[in-house]
Image: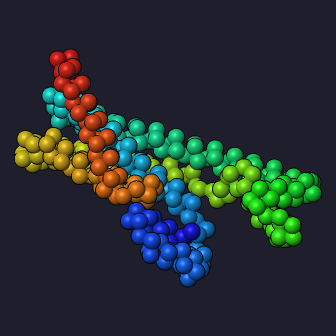
Amino acid sequence: MSKTRLRDARKAHEGMDLESSREAHSERAIKESLEEPTIHDVARGQYIGDMVYGAIDGIVTTFAVVSGVAGAELSAGIVLILGFANLFADGLSMAVGNYLGAKSENEYKRRERYREEWEIEHLPDEEKQEIRQIYHRKGFTGELLERVVEVITRDKKQWVDTMLLEELHIVPEQTSPIMSGFMTFASFVIAGFVPLFSYVLSYFVPFFAEHAYPLSVGLTFATIFIVGSLRVYVTGKRWWTSGLEMLLVGGATAVVAYFIGYLLRGLA
């Protein structure tokens, strides 16, 4: 199902709109969705997830640092030192972790693909029987089942892709580990800079020096809500629900960090 038709179907379901749901499942809508290019949909979805969660982690963790320092009543300079140290160190750590995770997943997919290709080449009858059993469990029988097996096993790539998806539940498409890591790092740093913005300006504008933390709270909460609402592209929830959820999480994190800093303020 294409993104457009999937979005329409979800919207219809949320509103329990039977007519709109029927339209999303019409012959015309199905035909148009199948004609849309979908070869990189999995990769795009992966990168969107990397960006959204990288941004959320960046802004929440950096704001926690800012709140902790503000609670301890330390200077703006301490906020910037700890904030930027967290911003780049934690962002790089998250990006490297995402890179290694995507790289390991791709290596696993390649290894399993190679195994399936080898088995199809050396054990074609046994592999055909696997396809036959898979589609028999789906309800295909008799001549129709044999026709399905014949069509799938006629093309080696399609045969391998089917085995990966149906037997091993592996989506054949691969993502770029470098791009995945970069998207995570970039979104982490950009969103994570928001809580520090008013403190940077405080060195140039007296007004910001006097109200740096309240301004940071306002900017951060607005950004958390916006970034949280973008989770709709990953979770499929209502945008405002996703935004409020992240606002609650970010607010709770900030409150905890602020009071920990406040309780320990005498140590600095």
What residue lies at 87% left-to-right and 59% top-to-bottom?
128
Horizontal side of 67 relative to 103 (left or right) equals left
Q: How many marks?
A: 0
Nearest the viewer among 114 and 230 is 230
Q: Pick the quarter of the image with the N terminus.
A: bottom right
Q: Going by the picture, which residue comes out furthest to the bottom?
A: 28
Q: Residue at x 17, y 17 (%)?
A: 266
Residue appearing at x 24%, y 24% in the figure:
260
Toward the viewer: 34 or 51? 34
Query: In the image, residue 168 lies at what x, y percent?
Result: 72, 49
Q: How is the image coloured?
A: rainbow
Residue at horizontal 41%, vertical 42%?
Answer: 91
> The C terminus appears in which quarter of the rendering?
top left
Q: Indicate left or right for 169 with 186 as reference.
A: right
- Residue 121 visible somewhere in the drawing: no
Q: Out of 13 and 255, give the one closest to the viewer.
A: 13
The residue furthest top is 267
Residue 149 in percent (x, y) is at: 84, 65
Query: In the figure, is residue 13 to the left or right of 243?
Result: right
User: Could you say which is closer to the camera, residue 229 or residue 179?
Assistant: 229
Residue 195: tell me if it is visible.
yes
The vertical placement of 38 against 112, above or below, is below
Q: What percent of the width, then of the height, locates residue 153? A: 84, 65
**177 vs 85: above or below:** below
Q: Is residue 253 above or below residue 112?
A: above
- Residue 263: give x, y in percent of width and height: 19, 20
Answer with the quarter of the image where residue 82 lies. Answer: top left
